[in-house]
Every structure is written in structure tokens, then in C-alpha cells.
Image (tube, grey):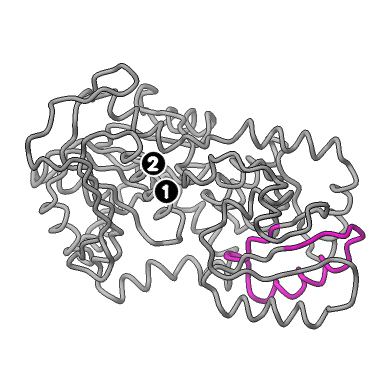
Amino acid sequence: MAKGTGTQAVHRTAFTTVGDARPAAITLAGNMYPVHKNVLILSASAGAGHVRAAEALVHAFHTLGTGSSVVHADVLGYANRPFRALYAKMHYNMANRAPHLLGWLYDKSDRPGRNNWARLAFNRLNLHGCLGFIERVNPDLVISTHFLPAELVTWLRAKRRIACRQAIVVTDYDAHSMWLVPDQEHYFVALEETREHMAGFGIARRRLTVSGIPIDPAFRRPVSQCQARLKLGLDVERPTLLVSAGGICCTAIGPIVGALRRMRHRAQVLVMCGRNRAMKCLVDAAVRSTEGSGSVTIESVGYTTRMAEYMAASDILIGKPGGLTMSEALASGLIFAIVDPIPGQEERNADHLLEQGVAVRCNNISVLGYKLDALLDDHNRMIEMRENACRLSRPDAAETVVRTLLERGDRA
């Protein structure tokens, strides 16, 4: 792992060992694909999803044996400290303190064709180090999992400081106009509806591929629910509920634990807190305060690399519908219980899940246990919802992105 000029580590993977003596093409599934000597995958740590999607793409290049040198970098690692803090934390803080303002800003800024030159100039000024890094890598192909790095690469191409192919992977189920960055060879989206939406802005359909959102290959491995529960030390017979606490407001976690305690079913609940130690402490305190009230067992889980196993072990995911979490859960065949989605992006994601028959929505936390009991009572409905989740999932999204770009070669 090599360090960049900023604070963020750069992930570099070389898939050949013979210096510059690389073949002109490689064979995948019987087809000859052109080799891209330098592939640069750019993300932005404004939420973990963009980074996780980029890491899945790195793995796909490795799995397909493309003969490329692949570098993944988080562009915010090259920003000055105030800009990095502003960009990374602003969305989280607004989501918790002023969600309706965030939703208003989301809708107000969704104006295709609007060229906000002041914002672009401000971003370039604060990401000057990243511009230099991209030039030094001198990529043949750039794939962006966030619109911020895509805008930087477009500007460098316009100034003729680099010459490369460029593509965007949209990491939400709905495409905000911020994703419409000029000079993109290809867009990868999650749904057919999103493809039609972007085609309506004049983007040729041949430049739009419904790939799904790239996810870690661990979610593609067939692990039975029973096996996963045994490996995690869970009761094989009990319904298992997974609470994704990462995006949930701290003040809501106590009422959520209380509502789950009141369920009739003898469920086991896993509250996934990630690296948020404060959240884990709050969950543990809420569990202690409700101990002995009901037959539901609740356990908090900190940061883990076994999320695929936890999802495979579960029946229902409770939380907010972020793009990556949705994709991972769908690949695991999970049903969603949507709790208080943030206006804007998450509201739109929630609409897609509800339309596809994969989710129920709980607007009042006090009735969360009631709604989950009703769902668990209806076995046939749960089977149908799991089937809908599997139908909607695209676990091979990362490989689809890589193969599509290799197949297109140098075509515009």
C-alpha cells in the first residue's frame, strides 16, 4: 500500500510483473479485450458507500485478470483539512439535525444542465493536490464512484493535461443531476428506471448500462441462513433482525430498542454500529434498561468484516436505505423495514424498494414492533418479498462494469 501526497492511503494493485512488457490484448471468456495499462478508480469518503463500491471494482479487475495496474484513491485524502471535514461531515450533520433542509437542498439542486462554475472552481482550489496526483498516475481509464472526482477528471481532460477514457458508477438507485458530469464515455446505474431518467437528458442509451451498484464479492458467496447463524453463534430457529444503525440518529436508537423489545415473536436482534463507539454505548445502555421486558434478545455489534455473514443469517434489515446497504442486502435476499429515511436521496431509494415489493415502511418508531410482528406472521408474504429482493439484486455489478468497459475498448 503506497501513500499519496494527502492523508488518505492509496490502494495500488498491479496484476502483471513484467514491467512494461504487457500484451496488447487479453482474452476473457473467449473475447479479445484491449489492455489498459493504468486504471484509476476514484472515490470520495462522503459516506462509506462510494469507497466500498470502488474497492469492489478493484477486486473485479483482479478477478478478471485484466493485466492492468489498478489504483484506488479517495480524493478527499488530498484535500485541505477544513474542506475535507466540511465535505465528509456536512451531509451527516444535516441528516441528523436538519433532515428536511437537506431534502429541500437535494431537490432544489437537482437541475440538469446547470453549470455551477463557482462550486467547481471552489472544489478544484481545495483539491489541488488531487489534480497533481491524477496527472502523475496518467491513467488510461478512470472510473469514478462519486461525482466530485469525475468533475476533476473532466476539467483535466478539457485542459488537455491528461488523455484518458472516463466512466461514472452511480452509487444510488436514483440519479441526482450532480451525477451528470460532462465528457463521460459511459454511465453505470442501478435500475432500468434510472437509465430511462438519464436518457431523457439526451444521454445516448448505448452509453448507459444497468449494472447495479458494485458490492464486495463476499455477498455473492452462497451461504445458507442456517450455516451463517451457526457460524455466528446465533439461534438457528429464531427470526433474526439486523438493525443498520450507521445512519440512524442517536436519539432514535433508544426508542427503536424499546419497540423491538415489545415484539410478540421470540426474535434475535443484531444492532450493527460499525465504528461508531458512541452509538454502541447507547445501544448497550438501551438494552440494559429494557432487560427482562419481553422475549427478544438484542446484541450490539461493533466494526466487523463479517457483514456478509450477518446479512446471510438475517431475515429483515431495519434502517435507512443507503445505496450500498441496499445492494448488499438485496444480494442477501433481505426484506427491508425502512425507518425514517432522509428526505431526498433516501426517500427516493425507499420509493424504489416499496414499488418493487421488497420493503415495509415505519414512519412511527412506536409501531415498529407491531409492523414486524405482522410481517413475521405472514409467511407467504415474506417468501414473496425475499424472491422480489433476489430478482432486484445484481451481485455481479462490479464485474459487469469492468467487462463493459473492456468490451467497448476505445469506442466513444
Q: Amino acid at mark 2?
A: Val
Task: From the top left corner, tell me how far across and down residue 19 is, in percent.
Answer: 8, 42
- Taking depth in this image into account, of 194 and 270 the one nearest to the observer is 270
Relative to the observer, which residue lies in front, 216 or 360? 216
| Quadrant of the snapshot with the C terminus | top left
Residue in the picture at 41% in, 53% down: 50
Span colored in magenta: 242-269
Answer few, some or many: residues within 10 Å of disc 1's Cα (few below 14, many 20 plus, some between 14 and 19): many
Element type where label 1 sits in the image: helix
**Quarter residue 125 falls in:** bottom left
Q: How many marks?
A: 2
Q: Is residue 30 magenta?
A: no
Reply yes or no: does residue 250 show up in magenta.
Answer: yes
Q: Is residue 198 toward the left or the right of residue 395 in the image?
A: left
Q: Give the CA separation, mark 2 to mark 1.
A: 9 Å
Disc 2 is placed on an element classified as: strand
| Residue hosting label 1 | 53
Decide: is 152 above or below 357: below
Which quadrant would residue 66 be assigned to in this image? top left
Discs 2, 1 touching: Cβ within 8 Å: yes
Q: With respect to residue 253, does 28 lie above or below?
A: above
Residue type for callout 1 = Ala
x and y percentages locating residue 198 in the rendered image: 43, 33
In which image quadrant can residue 16 be found? top left
Give percent across and percent down for residue 90.
44, 69
Residue bearing mark 2: 169
Q: Earlier in the sequence, mark 2 or mark 1?
A: 1
The residue shown at (60%, 56%) is: 343
List x then y, in percent, for residue 62: 31, 41
Q: Quadrant of the N terminus?
A: bottom left
